[in-house]
Amino acid sequence: MAGHSKWAQIKRKKAANDKQRGAIISKHIRAIQAAVRSGGSGDPAANLALKNTLAAAKADSVPQDNIDRAIERAVGGSEGGGFDEVVYEGYAPAGVALLVEALTDNRNRTAGEVRHVFTKYGGNMSGSTAWQFDSKGVIVLRDTSEQVQELVIGLEVEDLELDGDTLTLYTDPGSLYTVLERLQEAGLEPEVSQLTKVPQTVTALSPEDSAKVLRLIEALEELDDVQNVYSTAEFADVVEAS
């Protein structure tokens, strides 16, 4: 389940993030400011887009001080305007579908950069891939006890994954925060809780193809305007661990 598990892909991304913390924080700050401006409020209780964005920032361990300052600046109207949300679709080597979410103030620049990366690393931007992904809420717990599993089964959870010492819950997007609140009321604090895109089916990859696809994904993630990259890849264990 190394590639199919969303948690496996989150772990890969978090490991990469540790090497480029400054760039990752900057991406989240931009997203937070844009969410405040588009939602018209710095209060996540009244701004669902901001609530989702904050959850993603916390999953990447963005410091609270940075988050607070970003919200304050955006509420003041000095930053966060002029950004458009755009989505790019394409394929990596071995037929792996990719869905790329970006936040940009220059659509032509961003499209050119994304297309260049696809081409450089053996992918292409022809065809539609969005239909291959479902929007889901994902919650990851570092507690796999029977007591916790029994609690989870009674919640609005669509699917569960037990992988070593982690329990991954998938919810309908609209139920994510309800489930999260129930878990917190029970004294549990998830390691990850955010909205995501989950592939309907996955493509199992050899170690060689895994390396090729990872190079493309990581190059896309390094672009300033790119916020998220989702794939249908099931990476070989040997590559995931490297």
Image (cartoon, rainbow, N blue to C red):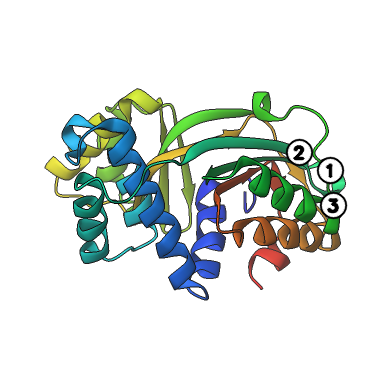
Which residue in the structure is indicated by mark 1?
124
Q: Residues within 10 Å of mark 3 (few under 14, many from 20)?
A: few
**In x, y percent, where is residue 7?**
50, 51
Q: How far is the residue under mark 1 from the one under mark 2?
A: 6 Å
* Near-viewer residue (107 or 101): 107
Is there any visible trace of residue 79 in the rendered image?
yes
Q: How far is the residue under mark 3 from the one under mark 1?
A: 6 Å
Residue 142, compared with residue 42, is above or below; it is below
Give the residue at x 16% y 39%: 43
Q: Residues within 10 Å of mark 2 (few under 14, many from 20)?
A: many
Q: Amino acid at mark 1?
A: Asn
Residue 59, compared with residue 44, is above or below; it is below
Which residue in the structure is indicated by mark 3?
119
Which residue in the structure is indicated by mark 2?
90
**In x, y percent, where is residue 188?**
20, 50
The quadrant in which residue 211 appears is bottom right
Foreground: disc 3 or disc 2: 3
Q: Nearer the N terminus, badge 3 or badge 1?
A: 3
Image position of 38 (left or right of 214):
left
**In x, y percent, where is residue 110?**
64, 48
Give the residue at x 60% y 57%: 221
Q: Residue furthest front?
A: 78
The quadrant in which residue 201 appears is top right
Q: How far is the residue under mark 3 from the one under mark 2?
A: 10 Å
**In x, y percent, where is residue 217?**
68, 55
Q: Amino acid at mark 2?
A: Gly
Q: Are marks 3 and 1 in contact (CB under 8 Å)?
A: yes
Q: Are marks 1 and 2 in contact (CB under 8 Å)?
A: yes
